[in-house]
Image: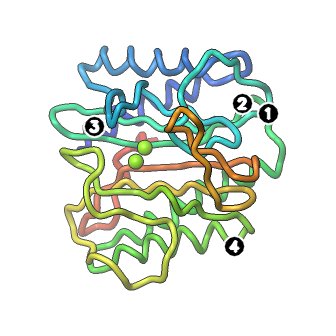
Amino acid sequence: MRAAGKMVAEILQLISDRVKPGVTTLELDQLAENECRKRHARPAFKGYGGFPYTICASPNDRIVHGFPNREPLREGDILSVDFGLIIDGFHGDSALTIPVGQIEPATARLLETTRESLECGIAQALPGGRLSDVSHAVQTRAERDGFSVVREFVGHGIGRQLHEDPQIPNYGTPGHGPKLKSGMTLAIEPMINAGLPGVKILEDGWTAVTVDGLRSAHFEHTIAITDNGPEILTRLES
Ligand code: MG
Ligand code: MG
């Protein structure tokens, strides 16, 4: 799991570094696939439930599961990239929302809050706690800034499968759900909207967009619960 997580982090870093105005999300998809091949890893999303690409590329009002395409990114856009791979039978899964060039302060705040809501959730991933402690921490942090939590998509257990039990909602009251134990590996992934929490699915059957057309951000890490606290597997050591 550590090896898979590290590889995901490395490739997401390469994608992030490539994002700028004029670049297309299809180029980023190709980059991700090539980097998987170099490392003898398999993209986890391509073919999963019929999803046709290596990354999910979801700009602006796209929440998750967007298809990479030939449309160039523009200055001031934001791009959520979700990426997972399989190596030696284990999965890593991580996502982040990347600014394209200079973004407006209100958008920067949405990104910062979403990133922090993930950190708050991870901080509750402790042995002896309950799963909804994580959910509650994410929701509390996101709503403090007036943003809303997407209900339709959730985090998940991860390991030999991309999506394992338990499901991890990004909202809820603390003290409920499965007891957290050392050795569990979870993908925690808040999707936070600037406006209303509602979601629509586009005609491709995959792409989730906000109902009001306002922007959405997505940050995800694969983590391990340990006796020494949560270990973030998809973060590069600094
Ligand atoms: Mg993901
Ligand atoms: Mg995930």
Residue situated furthest bottom in the rendering: 175
Give the left or right position of residue 74, taking residue 188 as reference.
right
Label 2 to label 4: alpha-carbon separation: 26 Å
Pointer 3 with pointer 1, Cβ within 8 A: no
Q: For the residue carrying disc 2, how many other residues have a C-alpha within 10 Å: few (<14), some (14-19), or many (20+)?
A: many
Q: Residue at x 69, y 43 (%)?
A: 61
The residue identified by callout 2 is 100
Task: Name the N-terminal-most of marks 1 and 2.
Answer: 1
Q: Is residue 215 left or right of residue 230?
A: right
Residues at marks 1 and 2 touching, judged by CB atoms closer than 8 Å: yes
Q: Amino acid at mark 3?
A: Ala
Question: Judging from the image, what secondary structure is the residue with disc 1 in?
Answer: loop
Residue type, label 2: Val
- Residue occupied by mark 1: 76
Res 36 → quadrant = top left
Where disc 4 sits, the SS reads helix
Task: Locate residue 228, reporting x and y percent.
Answer: 28, 67
Residues at marks 1 and 4 touching, judged by CB atoms closer than 8 Å: no
Which quadrant, please, contains the N terminus? top left
- Earlier in the chain: of badge 3 and badge 1, it is 3
Seen at 54% across and 43% down, the residue is 64
- For mark 3, give the secondary structure: helix
Q: How many residues crowd around disc 1 within 10 Å: few (fewer than 14), some, or many (20 or more)?
A: some
Query: Which label was assigned to residue 144?
Result: 4
Q: Earlier in the sequence, mark 2 or mark 3?
A: 3
Nearest the camera: 227 or 20?
20
Q: Amino acid at mark 4?
A: Arg
Q: Residue furthest left?
A: 88
- Residue 193 appears at what percent x and percent y? 67, 56
Could you tell me how far apart the alpha carbons at marks 1 and 2 are, in whole angstroms? 6 Å
